[in-house]
Image (cartoon, coloured by chain):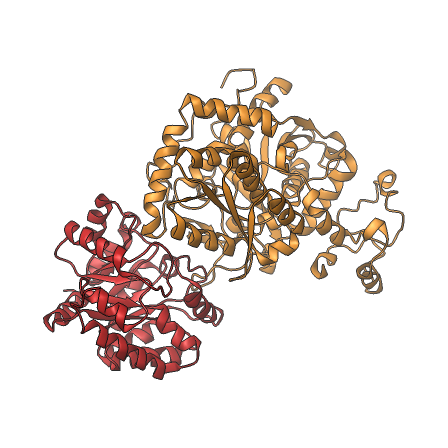
Chain colours: A orange, B red
Amino acid sequence: MTTTSPPQPGDLSLPARPGWPDATGHFGVFGGRFVPEALIAALDELTEAYEAMRVDPVFLEEFARLQRDYTGRPSPLTEVPRFAEHAGGARILLKREDLNHTGSHKINNVLGQALLTKRIGKTRVIAETGAGQHGVATATAAALMGLSCTVYMGEEDTRRQALNVARMRLLGAEVIPVTTGSRTLKDAINEAFRDWVTNVETTNYVFGTVAGPHPFPAMVRDFQRVIGDEARVQVLEREGRLPDAVLACVGGGSNAIGIFTAFIADEGVRLLGLEAGGDGVDSGRHAATITGGTPGVLHGARSFLLQDENGQTIESHSISAGLDYPGVGPEHSYLHDIGRAEYRPITDAEAMEAFALLCRTEGIIPAIESAHALAGAMKLGRELGPDALLLVNLSGRGDKDVETASAWFGLGENGAPTDEDDRAVEAGRGADPGPGMDTDQQPTEGAVSNDRVVAGQDAGETA
Amino acid sequence: MSRLAQRIAAAKAEGRAALIAYLPVGYPDVDASIAAMVAAVEAGADVIEIGVPYSDPGMDGPVIQEAVEVAVRAGVGLRDVFRAVEAVAAAGAVPVVMTYWNPIERYGVERFATDLAAAGGAGLITPDLIPDEAGAWIAAAERADLDRVFLVAPSSTDVRLRSTTAASRGFVYVASTMGVTGARASVSDAARVLVARTREARPDIALCVGLGVSNGAQAAELAAFADGVIVGSAYVRELLEGRGADGVRALTADLAAGVRRAGVPA
């Protein structure tokens, strides 16, 4: 790409796609379609309609208009020098997907799939959601386009992310708490597939990430690649050079694929995906699928997953509901396989340290998901040193995470200590700042007007 | 030579449809599930569809999910499944294994085919493996002389009916309705249409209808036009509600009488 002007958001079909997947949705040995025959006709219909739509000027214009006028694209690039002081002095640029309407990158994909739903004449959409961001985005697009909307959400997640449940209901969506299995995202996906196979004549499944059966991984990538297409031009314009590395958090992996895709051909640019390390990969309580998993089949595609010796899916663990998923999109497994991208785990504690640091040094509250990418940047920056230029996808904002963060850091209501804080203090943990509560940040720390509020990482366990 | 095809043909020679009973291994525990399978054989089931427990059974409704979740939590695996296969074969029915794909991929496709054949299993029913993705399985099944039962659905196009039936051996699983497993008030209308379409795509293979069948009357309706009738959730419900092997026997008797009333128009 030699252009120096920002790409028009509608240029979805114009940038070269990577040479994968193949015509039947395979990324090397990964991907494909491992679904009941009953869904094949619907997947074929989607594939055909999408391939026609993605080069249709009427669609491209409509999609571009929505991205500009409704989402607020292009999203800006923000340099964060005070944060970068903690990253070995490397320069860090954030791609601000948190500023999108609905608060994350999820809207990029959902607008495309909602337009596709109308194009194939269906009137109802269903979606799965973990943190609730994809559910909120789907409910938003459904409201905008007059579609009826049902969102499946693990019962456990409806508790962790009550604010997003309320948002979805305000937007007119029906939210169904899923009580089977581990009651989290993977079970919500199972329920959504069961709904789809039953109601496929009227219903389209708006899948939230680059996983699932073909065509979802390729289609969601195409809708999300606007992140990297914009960012690549923005970095070149601003710096006259490409970044040394592009970093993003990886749960299912849509924001990462979204920012990676434009840089795939730039061999000098390292692509780094940060997985949810939970309590640490060695603890067994994590969601680091590529780092700690093995290849297998889950939710319609072959990819890395967390499984036991019988091939049963293992429950994942992460402080971030949006990364708390035992699978990963097949293109990530492929990029790992061919060595084009690297994947590293970030523990809950490391992510929360980066979370707090960005809040206090830059005045930006990130989603806990995105904080994994920030923590990865702190580590990589220290490895690469002061000349490095890092591009980090800030995939979402942290409003939804305020409660989780408060529990983690022991910040009670209005900064007053809670019972939990008292217990933490009694347990002897209260005296030291926990991960992320950086003692160098005194000026802003004054907002929390007591000195015994930091419970550290164990606070999240009892929340 | 396909043992499933032989058994279904033998039923046909008696002027009836074959009865295929699904039961998952490991509910309420491995021994009790095997006892329930043997009870079904003794009461007249021709084929036992032996279910492999799986953590993410995307095509199953609440009844089967509930039972299978217990088995998954208990760590039931393919070794237990092979024990069930041996017991069913010894009791005189044809054992066919029903499994989502990942447990087999994890075990190793070649190794699984070898061990299944050694245990006396006839083959596999694969609800989430379509022939397009089944190259390795079909090759392994060929080598071990095992049947591969793929599914067709009301939404299958004629092109897919042809390719799916062409890849099948033993019988073709005709999913009567769009949806997940579980009892339904009515199953026969869509099933009749799909059986006719499938038969046109491939006349020389047995067509067995499943999804939603729960009693002898429904079995009789289906037996009028299908070569076999598959019953799953109704069996599992017998176990979930605590009626055990006796419940399985009584249900089988009702269904076995149903498949012998073939020819009664719906």
For the C terminus of chain A, the quadrant is bottom right
- Residue at far front of view: B266
- Residue B11 placement, left or right of A104: left
User: Is residue B205 shown to the viewer in this render?
Assistant: yes
Counting the numbered discs, the total is 0
Q: Is residue A79 above or below residue A194?
A: above
- For this orientation, the residue located farthest to the bottom is B246
Q: Nearer the viewer, residue B32 or A389?
A: B32
Where is residue A141? Give x, y as percent. Answer: 54, 36
The residue at the point 48 percent across, 30 percent down is: A264
A460 or B217, which is in the foreground?
B217
Q: Position of residue B180 (x, y in %)?
A: 38, 58
Q: In this view of the protein, can residue A394 be seen by the observer? A: no
Q: Give left or right: position of A52 versus A105.
A: left
x, y percentage for residue B78? 37, 68
Relative to residue A361, is residue A119 drawn left or right?
Answer: left
Question: Residue B65 location in percent, x, y?
Answer: 44, 65
Corner quadrant of residue B234: bottom left
Q: Relative to A65, is B18 above or below?
A: below
Foreground residue, B226 or A16? B226
**What residue appears at the point 75 percent right and 43 percent down from the top-left corner?**
A356
